[in-house]
Amino acid sequence: MKTLYLYILRCSDESFYTGVTNDMDRRLWEHQQGVDEDAYTYSRRPVEVVFLDEFPDPTQAIEAEKRVKSWSLAKKQALIDGN
């Protein structure tokens, strides 16, 4: 079973993007290159990885992503800061 990564990117406009991937290097490259013109990060490049967590279980990773996406900027910043 592959490890999944929950990640948070800080965008150039200081907003956050939260996602899940099984290949962080590839996914960051896609965000930075603007592979998808309809993607949230496309017009907010460059982006920076500010949080990364590993999940051995895909269900847990997806649940964590949904939970974090619903959080306020302040709560996401607290997670990034380790609080």
Image (cartoon, rainbow, N blue to C red):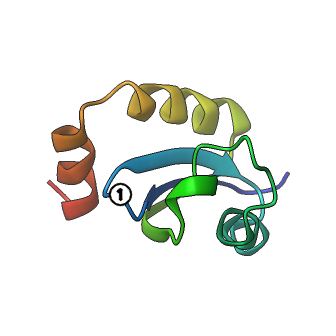
Residue 8: x percent and y percent? 46, 55
Q: Residue at x 30, y 29 (%)?
A: 71
**Which residue position holds label 1?**
13
Position of residue 48 measured from the top left corner of the image (x, y, whole percent): 46, 72
* Residue 80 can be seen, yes or no: yes
Does any portion of residue 6 appear in the rendered image? no
Is residue 66 depicted above or below 57 in this figure?
Answer: above
Res 22 → quadrant? bottom right
Q: Position of residue 38 (x, y in %)?
A: 73, 40
Q: Residue at x 35, y 50 (%)?
A: 15
For residue 12, side relative to residue 73 (left or right): right
The answer to which of 33 and 68 lies nearer the viewer is 33
Residue ID at (79%, 70%):
26
Q: Secondary structure at mark 1?
A: loop
Residue at image location 77% in from the left, 65% down from the top: 23
- Residue 40: image location, x then y, percent: 59, 43
Q: Give left or right: position of 7 versus 35.
A: left
Taking the image as shown, residue 14 lies to the left or right of residue 4, namely left
| Residue 33 lies in quadrant | bottom right
- The residue type indicated by label 1 comes to Asp
